[in-house]
Image (spheres, helix red, strand yellow):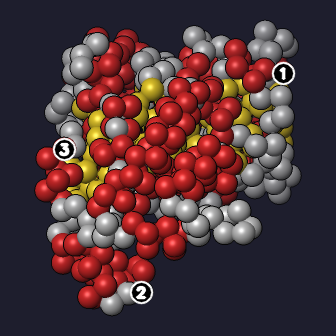
Amino acid sequence: MQTIYYDLRDTKGQQKEIEEKISAAAKILREGGLVAIPTETVYGLGANGLDAKAVRRIFEAKGRPQDNPLILHVTGPQWLPRYCRDIPPMAYVLARKFWPGPLTMILKRRDVVPDETTAGLDTVGVRCPNHPVTLAIIREAGVPIAAPSANTSGRPSCTTAQSVMEDMSDKIEGVVDGGPCAVGVESTILDLTCDPPRLLRPGGLPVEALEQLIGPIAVDKAVTGVLPEGEKPRAPGMKYRHYAPKAPVTVVTGAPEASAREIQRRVGPGSGVICFDEYAGLFSEQVVHSLGPSADKQIQAQRVFDALRTFDGSPVTEIYAQCPDSRGLGLAVGNRLKKAAGFHIIEADSLRIILGITGCTGAGKTSALEAIRDLGGTIIDCDAVYHEMLDENQELRNAINASFPGVFGADGRLDRKKLGQEVFAKKDRLARLNGIVFRFLIPEIERRVENTGDGLYAIDAINLLESGLDRLCDRTIAVTAPVELRVRRIMARDNITEQYARLRISAQRPDEYYRSKCDCELGNSLESPEEFREEARKFFVRLLETIKEEKRHGAR
Ligand code: TXA
Ligand code: MG
């Protein structure tokens, strides 16, 4: 099928020619064809919303899952009673104020609307788009136009007719070019069949504007995160991975300076970056698409889909994106970026937070540290630092050698086993060794912490409390677990006998010691390390919130 391109970018041109093109598009729609139409939000892929057969073709052209309903586009509130019933007065209040515009209302549907359009739901989404060309087409077609965004399912939405041609050419009868979309993100979807009304999708109309008119609105869970397995979203479309470029996306939230620096720390030469204009200069080795000035969310909304789409043309292996705060249009822009990232989000902050993690062997320290890494934290592994220093720091080597002669071999390397034997079960010798190690290690860790920027850090040290490194920490956390569980874990992990596992545990301090000395405890009685890692992640998210609150208010 050859797709006809109708250029209607300049509606001030030849009146007759414009009217002819509008009539041609309306005729195709009336006769069951598909035409992509411009709206102020994104381009829509239109069909007669009352014609089940035509609507089915939309799903085919987009490759859209069958259970994802479509929005009916109408010319004004006077059309509402034709397709909806039990319409609350609030719907008219909203329509009078915000239509034509980026607001979709979910209302009870009438039977004239086919199941194909609503995906079998007893509700229907209705909106009046703010674009003169499309309003003229709908008026002339005389039917409500069902129109999802005109992209291939799963790809970023289209904000220009060129993007539509990329995805849809030869699959549909026509594309009407009405210029680039002024808003750039899809409509805000508000469910009016419940009380209070519920935001199903943040969009081109900020929630604040809605709340000012009608009072508090509930925000659906699917707006801010991934729904738990098995839970059904109220807007079926919110469950799909969406807007996604081919390379994986990571969103970095936080103050713009902090998120830019965080991204800078993470990128390599093959990375792509979506950033605010002010920070583009930091990424000279990366493929950059700028989102607009950090203070101008309207421009960010206009550019967000294009930025995501354009990466598919360049060979980037990963994409990092800065994210605006969630006020005003920022909620919609951030939501599109986060959905593109499958809600893979790193929180950068202009604060430095240092956590000290300690506890016995087998308690789950490693999983806890992985959870901190999942949150974008950097781990300072004291054991690794100690080993680096053993290779490089002559003073430390001399000090050890003076107290434990013969532990350095002829090749100059420390014989760890020998040193271990020297101090095993000998309290005074162990104390002497620790005294030496801590004297060198602490200033080194302090230096590393001081030289880093803002962000989240975790100090991983068995001897966190004994060494005095706990002084550097905003919070110390004891990871604890029942002895029997620890025995089983270290037997499996280190492939040792039960007897030896018990010996190792009894050589260490008990949980009670860590519990009493640390600021907080992260208990681990879960069998699966993955489950514990997830539980730990939630624990740290809450803890970080508390610490940030304190820091902002100067407590502690
Ligand atoms: O700005 C827009 O709304 C654009 C332009 C073309 O108007 N359209 C658009 O349509 O974004 P689409 O199909 O890409 O997204 C519609 C969203 C989907 O998430 C769908 O699940 C939800 O609206 N939706 C549609 N009808 C619904 C209903 N009855 N109940 C709940 N959610 C509904
Ligand atoms: Mg869509």
Picture quarter containing residue 384?
bottom right
Does the rendering let one see residue 71? no
Q: Which of 528 and 420 is in front in this view?
A: 420
Q: What residue type is labelled 2?
A: Asn
Please give the residue where the numbered disc 3 appears in the rendered image.
Answer: 517
Q: CB of mark 2 within 8 Å of CB of mark 1?
A: no
Q: Which image quarter is the C terminus in?
A: top left
Query: Which residue is under mark 1?
Result: 17
Q: Quadrant of residue 160?
A: top right
Residue wearing tag 2: 495
Q: Which amino acid does label 1 sit on?
A: Glu
Q: Distance between the residues labelled 3 and 2?
A: 31 Å
Q: Is residue 82 above or below residue 368?
A: above
Residue at 70% from the left image edge and 20% from the top image edge: 279
Which SS class for mark 2? loop
- Report the residue at 21% width, 65% height from top: 481
